[in-house]
Image: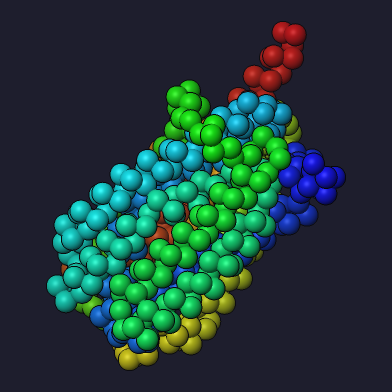
Amino acid sequence: MSAQTAVKNRNADLCTGPFLKKIWLYTLPIIATGLLQLLFNAADLVVVGRYAGEEALGAVGATGALINLIVNLFMGLSVGSGVMVAQGIGAKDDGIIHRTVHTSIPAAFFGGIFLTFVGVTFSPVFLEWMDTPDEIIGLSALYMRIYFAGIIPILLYNFGASILRAAGDTKSPLIFLSIAGVVNVLLNLVFVIVLHMSVAGVALATTISQLLACVLVLLKLARREDACRLEWRKLKIYPLDLWKIARIGLPAGIQGSLFSISNVMIQSSINGFGKIALAGNTAAGNIEGFVYVAMNAFHQTAMNFMGQNTGARKYENFSKILWICLLSVGGVGILLGGGCYLFADSLLSIYITDSAQAVAYGVTRMSFVCVLYFLCGLMDVMSGMLRGMGSSLLPMAVTVLGVCGMRLGWIYTIFRMEQFHTLESLYISYPISWVLTFVALLVGFLVLKKRMMQRMALTVQNN
């Protein structure tokens, strides 16, 4: 192996400073990757909204919360894979890294088979449960069935990208999604404008482009020269390591799924205001998604930095990483969220060209959600910190109670009152839930850090 290859494949050291520079250099490619991934859906919505009409736009938008609800459980397992690899790197244990990599890939494959069956078979039923408007439910079901027919590559890509990021390689996923993103946009234009395939065209374009990203990330893993290298003949589910992945990843997945339940309930409530409100909400939610992925990159950064430092038992670095990530995500959230709101009319008009009322609905949502989105970023960083420390049940429990419980309680109490049965009343539940959850997670972090420091001091004393 050449010296250049050795350097390229060396795991990044996330345990030594200066942390401010390292955190930003690590995070920027994740932000760019997340934005590109979101552009898949944005391209779908822009093309279908401009060339297939308001109903097609609403049909695609109505599937987002439901798709997230179904797939988040398995996406959570990729979080467990990343944390295990990061902790193995911090502890310099190649055995943990090798077993985690070769357990993760088949777990993603078999999970994808299960999700394909569920999504293709039951999509119309799920959409009916959500009170999806009759005029768009057929198109929504078609979109979901094509999406879930290609779910295996999506899972494989996310598991592979999680492993690469844990090893410090945040640039490769960016490159792969850049390539796939160009393919996605080109296919959107061909399938929708030239072949007039409407929602089926945008779903097929997304599926094909994600397959390309999957192939590229797996090839990258296969060409590495360290413990993260993927060797096809050694693929095997190691039961103990699968349990360790699941111990961290399943609570994250359950949290994501339960988190989505509250969004599904809110989506169902929005559906009751009609297809115009649905179109405005869909466009606004997609714009907010760009702010979210930029902030969520710091969640991934916090998780992987904490994972390596936990494995190396460098607990003294915890607070430095925490405050840098919190200040960074807060600044990004305020800048991007406020900026999107200031240009809300222009941004919404990219998606909606035939309804001023739908644009007005979108502006209403952004005034309550987008402006205060930085609070969600603070909450997510705290959750990532705890998961990197190896604690996944605590952030799951706190988030389920603080976000899901609060929002569901809001929908079934305050929102049902006639004077509060408005979209504004629905949207204000978002920032309230973020603040409550952030405070609880911060307290949990401080308690867990203190316990870990005490255990380490006791170990040193006994030795």
Picture coordinates of residue 203, whole percent (x, y): 35, 68
Question: Which of 344/217 is in front?
Answer: 217
Question: In the rendered picture of this protein, how many numbered marks are placed on residues?
Answer: 0
Query: Where is 130 relative to 12, above or below?
Result: below
Q: Quadrant of residue 234?
A: top right
Picture coordinates of residue 59, whole percent (x, y): 27, 73
| The N terminus: image quadrant | top right
Q: How is the image coloured?
A: rainbow
Tell me if I can see residue 393 in this picture.
no
Query: Where is 375 relative to 199, above or below?
Result: above
Question: Which of 328/444 is in front?
Answer: 328
| The C terminus: image quadrant | top right
Is residue 323 toward the left or the right of residue 447 in the image? right
Residue in the picture at 16% in, 57% down: 125
Q: Quadrant of residue 149?
A: bottom left
Question: Which of 319/358 is in front?
Answer: 358
Picture coordinates of residue 410, whole percent (x, y): 28, 56
Residue in the picture at 70% in, 33% down: 90
In the displayed orientation, state which residue is furthest to the top. 462
Is residue 274 toward the left or the right of residue 432 in the image? left
Residue in the picture at 71% in, 40% down: 225
Q: Quadrant of residue 318?
A: top right
In the displayed orientation, state which residue is furthest to the right. 3
Tell me if I can see residue 231 in this picture.
yes
Picture coordinates of residue 266, whole percent (x, y): 29, 62
Residue in the picture at 63% in, 26% down: 95
